[in-house]
Amino acid sequence: MAATDSSVTTDEISHLVEKKRDQGSHECEVLGTSSHEAEESSLAWQMCTKNPGHHQFIPAAEFSLDKLPQWCRKPLVLDYVKYMCATTVRLKVGYTSWDRPDGYCFSSCRGTSLAHFGSGHLIAMSQHDGPCQCPECESSPSPHQTCHKLYIATAQHVVFNTEEAKATQVSFFYDDEASGTDGRVKIVWGTRGGSKGHEGDNSIFMCVTHDETLVSELKQIQAQYKHLKFKFEGQAGTSPNIDWKNLCVVVSHPHGQPKKITVGEMKSCTGAGTCNRRQFSYSTATCRGSSGAFVLSLEFYEAMPYVSWYTGMMWGAAHSFGGLNGEYNKSAYSNPDVADFFTPISVRLPRSMLWLLGGTWMKSVWCLVNK
Ligand SMILES: [Zn+2]
Ligand SMILES: [Zn+2]
């Protein structure tokens, strides 16, 4: 811990205290010295006052159907959670930009390199020919000639702009303690950020890598789960599956620790009545380090009220605010670029179209097309 480490200066300790304090109800974790990162993260986990004991936080590897509420123990729901899990990343942001406005989260620490930790998830990737622009290749006389761009969604208060994206270490597959040392964790660095999503505490930044092993793993994950959203939204009918309630799942790296899953309910939703500009509040547990994590809501939506026609609906947004004094947690406004990652590109239609067409009918067509 920084406070007991004689190599840490008084200035560093005061920066640490100031940065931890200067984020309102956002939930980044701030750890003092990178040389003691693991110990500090572990101590923050043990000393947590928001969720002492972390009983609701399920390690990624231990998640199974019986961890879901009885009424939604369905393989399709479990697949959703597994998919979120596989694409969730830990973010370590090693710089706080001078561009953060006065009064904004961490503005008192602008220009410093004290790291904060959050969560995010992969929303897209693409292959590019030409010199790789990852940090390793940028300083090499013979850069790789093929690279992959990975797009990560998180909250803007976690990764504010390109300057911060470039100082962001992105860890894939940090699923348990051992994964950090046995080679399973794959690390890439941000290269550019803030291209869109600055509205409503959303941030999408890009990483570049030539790591074919990582990309191959990610492609397998995409292939395995690519039709999930359509399968869920294709479940329609005249009743919302009798006992169906609203499910809200968060996968994050609380306190910078290995990935954990929490399950709860969506409690309310505010915003314009469109699909893409909503802010959610939820009972699902989060802690410092959960900022920017993907918040998944699965529900049945009354698409055609006059005939009581329901269709499955998946919503997604980045975790933004931790509820204080018994209040519920809150997301950023939902982001269509994030939510649509779950939809196969070939059937990306406006949601109003999906409602009009009805899920079952669409599902039949989809089955025919993909026979
Ligand atoms: Zn905690
Ligand atoms: Zn490279």
Image: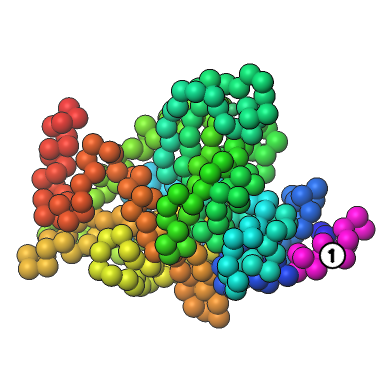
Decide whether residue 121 is among the magenta residues: no
Decide whether residue 13 is among the magenta residues: yes
Quarter holding the N terminus is bottom right
Magenta stretch, overall SS: helix
Of the pair 41 and 141, the residue shown nearer to us = 141
Q: Tell me the quarter of the picture where residue 356 sits.
A: bottom left
Q: Residue at x 51, y 69 (%)?
A: 321
Tell me the kind of residue under disc 1: Asp
Q: Is residue 139 visible?
A: yes
Q: Position of residue 96 (x, y in %)?
A: 65, 57
Rendered view: 113 above or below 179: below
Q: Residue at x 33, y 37 (%)?
A: 226
Q: Is residue 94 left or right of residue 103?
A: right
Q: Which residue is mark 1?
A: 11
Q: Quadrant of ligand 2?
A: top right
Q: Assess mark 1: CB under 8 A from ligand 1?
A: no
How crowded pointer 1 is (Cα within 10 Å; few <14, some 14-19, many 20+) is rated as few
Q: Residue furthest right?
A: 6
Of the pair 142 and 10, the residue shown nearer to us = 142
Rendered view: 264 above or below 168: below
Q: Position of residue 40 (x, y in %)?
A: 76, 56
Per the rendered image, the range of residues in magenta is 3-17
